[in-house]
Amino acid sequence: MRYLPLTPDDRARMLGVIGAPDVDALFVDVPAAARGAAFDLPPHAGEMEVERALAALAAKNRAAGAGPFFCGAGAYRHHVPASVDHIIQRSEFLTSYTPYQPEIAQGTLQVLFEFQTQVAALTGLEVANASMYDGSTACAEAVMMAQRVTRREKAILCGGLHPHYAQVTQTIAHAEGMEIVRQPAAIDPGDTVIAAIDDQTACVVVQTPNVFGVVTDVSKIAEAAHAKGALLVVVTTEAVSCGLLKSPGEMGADIAVAEGQSIGNALNFGGPYVGLFAAREKLVRQMPGRLCGETVDAEGRRGYVLTLSTREQHIRREKATSNICTNSGLCALAFSIHLSLLGGAGLRRLALINHSRARELADAVKGAGLEVLTPRFFNEIAVRTPGPAAALVDALLADGIVAGVPFSRLDPAAGLDDVLLLAATETTTSEDIAALAAALARRSGR
Amino acid sequence: MTMNTVGRPTRPDAAAEAAAAPASLTGGRGLLQDEPLIFERGGWGKTGVDLPAPAHDAADLAGFVRDEVALPGLSEPETLRHYVRLSQKNHAIDLALYPLGSCTMKHNPRLNEKAARMAGFADLHPLQPAATVQGALELMDRLAHWLKTLTGMPAVALSPKAGAHGELCGLLCIKAAHEAAGQGQRRTVLVPTSAHGTNPATAAFVGYSVAEIAQTDDGRVDLADLAAKLGPDVAAIMVTNPNTCGLFERDIMEIARLAHEAGAYFYCDGANFNAIVGRVKPGDLGVDAMHINLHKTFSTPHGGGGPGAGPVVLSEALAPFAPAPWVVAGADGFQLAEQPAGEAAQAFGRMCAFHGQMGMFVRAYAYMLSHGADGLRQVAEDAVLNANYIKARLSGALTPAFPDGPCMHEALFDDAWLEGTGVTTLDFAKAMIDEGFHPMTMYFPLVVHGAMLIEPTETESLRELDRFCDALLALAQAAKAGDAERFKAAPVLAPMRRLDETLAARKPKLAWRPEAETG
Amino acid sequence: MRFTKDHEWVELDGDVATIGITAHAAEQLGDVVFVETPEVGKQVKAGDAFAVVESVKAASDVYAPISGEVVEANPELDSAPETVNASPEAGGWFAKVKVSDPAQFEALMDRDAYEAFLQTQ
């Protein structure tokens, strides 16, 4: 077995040193009734055979890049520079553990410090943590953090929040005892949430661009929330939009969470992704997750350590701010490398290209006779379809086009079966858009 | 006040500062470059990505647009230099043994990396039509089959993103099952004192109160104490097996029986599954729910702290409550049940935005196929053999916490042998760094004084094990010979000396800021 | 000054009690990096966790040795938590509480009793 270095001779020698007659003697504490388990599974296989089996499974899928492709709704297909994937496969990053021994983990720690700084800059807030599992769990954690800060139990989720984010937040924060008020799905709810904020409200959660692609200025919601002593949590599922749109911090957010997959990470069928989490500095001790901070070593040289760890489960146990332990370190590294390559200037241009592509897409869809429902968008639009959006997506598949996400797939109960979510990124070509427009025109009978 | 004095000194002490290493003229140490932050090397307004000019502007978003984000950019060669220089300051499994107990730092096969990057897996959107992702869903179904077979459990929830997330998932299943049975008054979770911190943290997270179960002198759950604490208020017990002392709970079936008799569920923390994979089925032991860290037992890389993956296997009683989405096999192929409706009507909710850590599923499945049933059994046997070999070789010099009987996949020592040397567990661990090894898990479990928990895993050769044991024996001899100075100063040969954690925590500096702002 | 088995001290001035942690506790904790003091106006019961003291290695609850209403929290601890190490039984006080039942004070250990208690630990 190619991954197991011990030889039969080694094993015999080692048993001799241990003073055990055979390896079974080491499993003596296993109850007799549980010994001798049989497993109906195949035997070991060579690298070539395993690769062949996996390639056969991979071949049964239609990769996003195989043709025109318009899915977004929380995960976005972007180009990732080749150097990003090369660097994250370096042994020292790939095969290292959480940096609990800072003397021999400065590589990872400095990366985390840089990552936190980048996330703070993107969100316009002062402090960011070293990552969460993904945007949706970061959203749930933000709601629970608001509960700790305000000591209030109610969270209001706006109607433009990604339904899966709302479900995750309901599942996790409700289990913790919070009351989660979810407003009905609405394409452009604007400031309507303000009426629901009262002095029992811990936080309001608003997504921008929202799940329908609508760009919202949340400043008024922030003011209204603060007037009632509540926090504003701003959610972003498309991190590239942070290069162009007003930052959550600028609009008055107290906590900003985002899905960071768009920068540096592949689609991966939904994971692993990287949750971004930032907040106002005064709230730092209520933040979940790991934090990396600057300090000095015994010779006075600058270095980095995990800090404020008394908030965390391994010390605070049942009183921890969160139970999170493993996070998304390597995805955060990929995010940070990609953003280091881009810089603010490159991110701006990337964001403008995304927006530009989406404008082309919106024009083409209108040209095909469909109504665009999103008044202001970044790189994603909601479109009214002639019949159920899901049926249209199935039909266009026959044309070789993956025509976005029917909203009904995310929230079947919302009564928005004729709403289709379409995204364009820098990887979308004019030919892709033309093909979609032509197919839409054909399918909708024009 | 509560007093927890078990822990670690947090500042380099004065003795350490005396032994400064000779310095270079420019700050680096030979090939170890002194690498500034990306924010300190110019690059403002620069970009290392060539992008075409956009066809349209953003005039339609007037009033919604920010200033350019203030971040520097790097060209590709500068990027490589920066990250390669940083990488060289990290320890890694590919460099040497990484003996962190209960962390299972084993070799990460590169075939797995290659497979996960196949376009048919990596370039799949989670919301593509099911017809376009049949291979991905089949892989999830196959992975589920292996996990169920290896654990002897009838169901598995794949979506949890790490071990602690899996614990949360398992406890939420248990909570849902109790509520469905009108047993919502069960609000207590029993956790042994030796448990990992995520166990009580997770129980508290779902609103349960936590009560501790005492431990016997031989490092196992105290059955009498457990029986006394079980009652109509107890929702579940959370027991790690093999436990965090590296021991198999001999009475595990009795523990399960007592819990079930009292109407509680048995949650097993599967962090140490590597010791028994392919040899023992947790389902045979009476487990109701157990998370499996794919980043431990099934070799997906730790990546400097993640990502992980924490699927949870479930008993018949808990299976209906598993969170969405479910992979469902039907006549027309595989589908995803994404809403709590239909066959998933009792699902307690949703753990994350999509279907879990697909990238980790591919890696773990490749690992399973590579090993097969026979190879996985060998994994457990070699992992246990290696740990017992270390225990046997070191026991003359170090004091094993539980000398009688074999350990499982990790060997636990206490600090009794250091008494009178002036050297602490922490000092000893830091001195290991100078010998080229990552320290073992220290001061955990809390039930053993000055604990040193060593888990070698099965992917270490006898030669590496001997190198490691020789180094520890040499260090032990130095400690006993009165060479405390070496330990107090250590590490002196690492990229950094001991760091001042007190300073970091008292005046937290969590992001770089331009000089002008920090004043 | 009176003491608890949980290593808090109390000094009573009229009906206002000043509360902190003992020199022994401060030494055991090591470098204190953060103190979460109670909110002014909060009603506390003897035995309730009413403050948190953090060193790098541990976060510990501090229990109210005496019941009453918090009337002042030590503002210095926000910016200089190290005061707890430097002056645990004077400048490093945590909070002042307007006492509702002065008899509780009398029931606590005096210094000799506390010193004797430490010997048994």
Image (cartoon, rainbow, N blue to C red):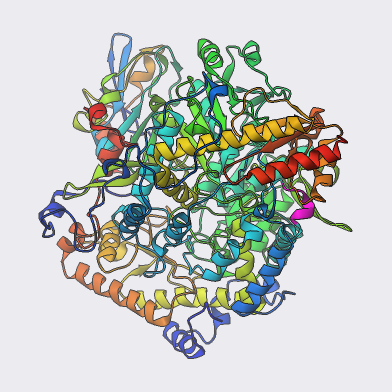
Q: Residue B389: x, y in percent?
A: 43, 78
Would you say B124 lies left or right of B74 here?
right
* Image quadrant occupied by the N terminus of chain B: top left
Q: Quadrant of residue B93?
A: bottom left
Q: Would you say residue A387 is visible in this rendering?
A: yes
User: Range of the magenta residues?
Assistant: B128-133
Q: Residue B204: x, y in percent?
A: 56, 38
Residue B129 counted in the magenta span: yes
Would you say A75 lies left or right of A126 here?
right
**Residue shown at the point (33%, 78%) measured from the top left:** B467
Would you say A429 lies left or right of C98 here?
right
Does residue B385 sit above or below B328 in this rendering? below
Q: Nearer the viewer, residue B205 or C5?
A: B205
Q: Residue B310: x, y in percent?
A: 60, 54
* Image quadrant occupied by the C terminus of chain B: top left
Q: Nearer the viewer, residue B254 or A203?
A: A203
